[in-house]
Amino acid sequence: MTKWLNVDQQHHWRAYIAATTLLHEQLSRELQDDHGISIGDYEILVHLSEAPHRTLRMSQLADSTLASRSRLSHQIDRLERAGFVRRQACEEDRRGQNAFLTEEGHALLVAAAPTHVTGVRNHLIDLLTDDEFSALGRACAIVAQHLDQSPHATSVSSANGDAGRTADSASAT
């Protein structure tokens, strides 16, 4: 038998859906308007900047950005045409491919990071008390861990804790 949400639970659930959708759209719009990239592109650049030699295997990059292999491939195609990343054959396994962050891509990331971090602060962190933000982080970590262990999960283990990290001290996701 279905255990329906009570009025308070329904209210909080809908607030969560609205907040996460609007926040993601706002952060992406700010990056697009100021730097010509989506938040998904930004995430790719961040992950590559944090990798040894600014290089990740495409499958690992897809997992760490929570993107499908197909979606990531299209994003990398766009970023490669713009000169921000380059595909390279994987030395360990010639069948695989790596994505490499170019100097142009790194420069874009360094330029875009303040826009992103300011948006995260203005639209989330500074609206909450430290206790509220900590509670939000703990709750999201519980949900992410649960979903990562579900049978249909996309790995999020490398994505946990991303909100406060920096890339070459220049970016945060």
Image (cartoon, grey):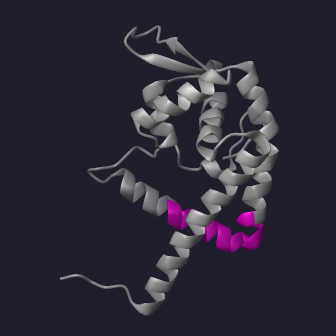
Q: Where is residue 173 in the image (x, y as percent from the top left)?
A: 66, 47
In the rendered view, would you say 134 is above or below 161?
below
In the rendered structure, the answer to whether residue 38 lies left or right of residue 156 reads right
Q: What residue is drawn where x is 65% and y is 40%? A: 42
Q: Is residue 159 above or below residue 124?
A: above
Residue at 71% x, 35% y: name it. Answer: 167
Residue 51 in view: no
Q: Which one is in front, 143 or 61?
A: 61
Q: Can the viewer see residue 10 in this picture?
A: yes
* As drawn, 34 above or below 91: below
Could you say where residue 73 lies in the image, as x and y percent from the top left? 47, 29
Quarter of the rendering occupied by the N terminus: bottom left
Task: Tell whether position 138 is magenta.
Answer: yes
User: Picture quarter containing residue 125?
Assistant: bottom right
Q: Which residue is drawn at 76% across and 32% down?
A: 108
Q: Residue furthest bottom?
A: 7
Magenta region: which residues?
123-140
Residue 131 found in image quarter: bottom right
What secondary structure prevails in the magenta region? Answer: helix
In the drawing, does residue 102 fall left or right of residue 18? right
